[in-house]
Image (cartoon, rainbow, N blue to C red):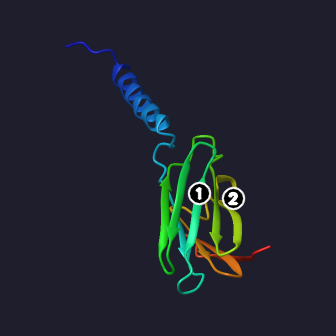
């Protein structure tokens, strides 16, 4: 059997390209983990939190989160590093919108998970790196 020397390299490159294209078609970079955003209702006992999250391409709908519970969603960051999700939080007569994932600033901070703790006077965020920041509502 006479096989040309470069045929194995060529076949490997074709297979690698095929797998990469399949990953890209799902909007996720190859070998890059999906991200999960967790929204935690820490308002007060018996106050329900209404959450509406979306990106440019995905509207995740409205979700009611009772006190102490979590709403979470998972996504694959896009190939351009521009993934952006924001959520609107509503309770009683309050309405606040927060950017919950911005690839430009959160990719390293939230390697797999981003946590958002919604409280009456502020919202706090925590990433996989352990840092926590809180922002008073305006």
Q: In the rendering, at what x and y percent does residue 32 appear?
A: 49, 50
Q: In the rendering, at what x and y percent does residue 40 appear?
A: 54, 74
Q: Is residue 21 or residue 2 the one in the foreground?
A: 21
Q: Quadrant of the N terminus?
A: top left
Indicate whether 60 appears above or below 92. above
- SS at badge 1: strand
Residue at the extreme top = 2
Residue appearing at x 57%, y 72% in the figure? 49
Q: Quadrant of the C terminus?
A: bottom right
Residue labelled with disc 1:
53
Residue appearing at x 69%, y 63% in the figure? 98
Per the rendering, the mark at residue 128 is none
Indicate whether 60 appears above or below 3. below
Left or right: 63 in relation to 84: left
Residue appearing at x 49%, y 67% in the figure? 71
Q: Is residue 126 or residue 45 the one in the foreground?
A: 45
Viewer-nearest of discs 2 and 1: 1
Comes first in the chain, label 2 or label 1: 1
Residue at the extreme front = 93
Few, some or many residues within 10 Å of mark 1 (<14, 14–19, 20+): many
Left or right: 106 in relation to 38: right
Indicate whether 35 appears above or below 8. below
Residue at the extreme right = 138
- SS at badge 2: helix
Per the rendering, the mark at residue 105 is 2
Q: In the rendering, at what x and y percent does residue 97 appear?
A: 70, 63
Residue appearing at x 45%, y 35% in the figure? 20
């Amino acid at each position: 059997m006479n096989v040309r020397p470069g045929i194995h390299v060529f076949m490997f490159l074709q297979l690698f390209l095929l797998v990469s294209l399949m990953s890209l078609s799902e909007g996720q970079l190859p070998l890059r983990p999906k991200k999960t955003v967790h929204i935690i209702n820490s308002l007060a006992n018996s106050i329900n939190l209404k959450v509406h999250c979306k990106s440019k391409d995905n509207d995740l709908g409205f979700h009611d989160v009772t006190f102490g519970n979590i709403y979470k969603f998972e996504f694959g960051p896009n190939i351009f590093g521009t993934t952006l999700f924001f959520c609107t939080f509503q309770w009683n007569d309050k309405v606040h919108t927060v950017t919950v994932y911005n690839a430009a600033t959160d990719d390293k901070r939230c390697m797999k998970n981003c946590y958002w703790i919604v409280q009456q006077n502020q919202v706090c965020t925590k990433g996989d790196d352990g840092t926590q920041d809180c922002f008073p509502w305006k």
